[in-house]
Amino acid sequence: MSDLETFRLETRAWLAENCPPKMRTPMKTDKDACWGGRNWVFQSEDQKIWLERMATKGWTSPSWPKEYGGGGLSRAEAKVLQQEMTVIGARSPLSSFGIWMLGPALLKFGTEEQKLHYLPEICRGEIRWCQGYSEPSAGSDLAALATKAEDKGDHFLVNGQKVWTSYADQADWIFCLVRTDNTGKKHHGISFILFDMETPGVSTKPILLISGRSPFCETFFEDVKVPLENLVGERDKGWSIAKYLLTHEREMIGDISINKSLSEIIADRGYTPGPMLRAKISEYETDEWAFGQTMTRMLMEAKAGASLGAKSSMLKYYGTELNKRRYELLMDASGHDGLEWEGERSNDGDLARLWLRTKGNSIEGGTSEIQLNIISKHILQLPGA
């Protein structure tokens, strides 16, 4: 028996013993996800137990080094873990921008002190992060950001505004792009800093979406004091960190990993689509499978040391389009029932609200138009792009 086969059997046995039964059921709404953080209220005791057990194993971030709270698994072992979790329908123990975006940036650009301080907290779900990138006048043109951080000797003094800051009103800390020099090209003079959202001078205001729900906020900074040691990487050279982090954000948005196929979900809901709709569903599931294989290949290349670079834009764009198609087909299959907006039967119109929410996938993390421009220029190398 190979080492990987042994690991699979051991993992299967551990999951069978340690994954609570309620954590092996599909999430009914996005509220069932566990985000952690100092103000998090667990939805159930099982949710708390599942996070604690997985964090103790380091399996909330299975491929991160053990010294930083991760599992230290190889990419092959991490894939086996994901496969075995999928087999039993195990939920992800932790949803985290710290894991998906900030963590990879800290692993590459952070000091040893920053890694030892922040990464274990992220793995244990003790700190919840939000992302301070877009601004009212600097969305697609992120390099035009104007939020300013002045060096006051022992701290930065931050003033400005961010927008579309997901879960800013629930986050503990923010990783934020600020301008520390305004004398050169706009891509220069940008720095990457971290600070507590409870720091005096930080305030947030939720933004309501057409779905009637929203994770987004406006975030305001007024004379916010940030210790100099919270700078990640070199001062004025945060653009490189920003671009690296965006590849992980776009990969995250493009990832439509699911526990159940669209056909299974439609069958579970009791819908009976006609032949034309069944053909569209089959076509979608074929495209979804092909995209999943492409995603797996690119992630294996990335874990082997290759840079995703502009390929992350390809993943983000196509994953976004697939997700929109998925919910369009679900709405088609549901008929009039899918339009219900309130009531216990529809879980307060969850399907309709999720369908509307997918429209934002084309904007967040860089608009689809921007992604197509990047693909044209850096992958296809089209003339004039």
Image (cartoon, grey):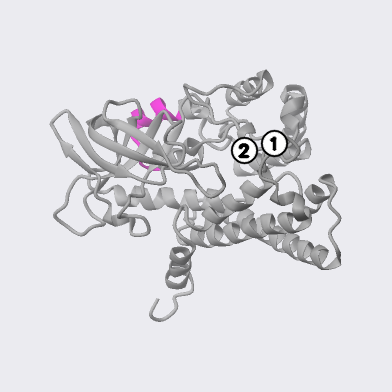
- The number of discs equals 2
Q: Which residues are magenta?
A: 108-119
114 sits left or right of 99 in the view:
left
Horizontal and vertical percent position of residue 253: 54, 50
Mark 2 neighbour density, 10 Å: few (under 14) some (14–19) many (20 or more): few
Name the one closer to the observer, 134 or 206.
Answer: 206
> In the structure shown, which secondary structural element does the residue marked by tag 2 occupy?
helix
Identify which residue is drawn at 42% across, 72% down: 377
- The mark found on residue 60 in the picture is none
Identify which residue is drawn at 80% across, 64% down: 277
- Quick check: is 109 in the magenta stretch? yes
- The mark found on residue 30 in the picture is 2
Residue at numbered disc 1: 27
Q: Is residue 352 visible?
A: yes
374 sits left or right of 238 in the view:
right
Amino acid type for the residue under numbered disc 1:
Met
Name the one closer to the observer, 241 or 171.
Answer: 171
| Pointers 2 and 1 in contact (C-beta within 8 Å) | yes
Q: Quadrant of the C terminus?
A: bottom left
Horizontal and vertical percent position of residue 329: 72, 58
274 sits left or right of 382 in the view:
right
Q: Is residue 300 visible?
A: no
Identify which residue is drawn at 50% across, 47% down: 209
Q: Quadrant of the N terminus?
A: top right
Name the one closer to the observer, 49 or 158.
Answer: 158
- Quick check: is 329 in the magenta stretch? no
Identify which residue is drawn at 43% across, 66% down: 374
Mark 1 neighbour density, 10 Å: few (under 14) some (14–19) many (20 or more): some
- Magenta stretch: dominant SS? helix
> In the structure shown, which secondary structural element does the residue marked by tag 1 occupy?
loop
